[in-house]
Amino acid sequence: MNNQLDDIDAEPVIQLTDMPAMSAPIPNYHPPVQPSFDKTKLILPVSILIAAVLISGSILYTQYSTGQNTGTPTVTQKPAGKVTIDLTNAMVLGDAKAPVTIVEYADFQCPFCDRYYQQDQIQFISQYVNSGKARFVWKDYAFLGQESVWAAEAARCANDQGKFWAYHDYLYSHQGAENSGAFSKANLKKFALALGLNASQFNTCLDTDKYASAVQQETQAGSAIGVSGTPATFINNQLVADSNGNSVGAASFATFKAIIDQILAR
């Protein structure tokens, strides 16, 4: 094996050999001219970097504000966090005398509310509501745009015919991009027909904005008790929150189950 240099960082040595005498004078040394740097070339990459930072921040804010906190947070339910929630004319599933009341504030356009419906609400109903241990309450928090308001109104119009929960489920199964036309009034009327509702009664209800004020008031009431994004869950009048007091959003069912089971064990 060839021996390597003991010090690989050492400065190279230039060996000098016998050189003939130079008859010509050594020319003056002129350092090479450094090319001028065009600062305008930085504009595009710097702009791209700034845009990337802004977009990343926007995504993080959106995920937070719409409840995309789906890990296993440190959950708090402090007595000081109790609020008053008016259940008059609320959409309720289950026995009014159940020891546990689960209230969800949600927006039909919110994709995390759909996830909550699929992974949490369905299990609330099967494990607790159907057994009489809990009741589940829907509350409107229509904050993502006009189609959120129309969808909430339409669900209330369906409730006039005893079909709120069927319409609620149908909306989630037909979600589209926010305010893309998925929940236009024309489509909402088609949903009513698909569910066998009286079209004339439903259309009149929706076209006259019969429940627009009610949806607005319920959304404002949610804000007054600390709702700032969807879904937000209250169990026995206390927000299910992380250690910083923020809603856990569409958390795993185990997160909510632990709280419910603790209440039932008292």
Image: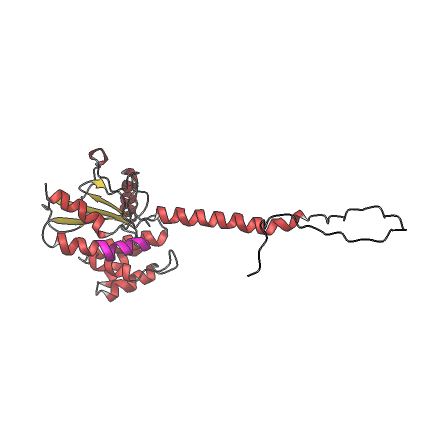
Q: Is residue 160 visible?
A: no
- Residue drawn at x 36%, y 52% is 146
Near-viewer residue (38 or 27): 27
- Residue drawn at x 22%, y 52% is 253
- To which quarter of the image does residue 86 belong? top left
Q: Quadrant of the N terminus?
A: bottom right
First to last magenta residue range? 110-120
* Residue 87, image x, y percentages: 18, 44
- Residue drawn at x 29%, y 62% is 189
Near-viewer residue (205 or 73): 73
Near-viewer residue (94 or 247): 247
Q: Quadrant of the C terminus?
A: top left
- Residue drawn at x 25%, y 65% is 193
* Residue 214, image x, y percentages: 26, 46
Q: Is residue 118 magenta?
A: yes
Q: Tell whether 43 sits left or right of 199.
A: right
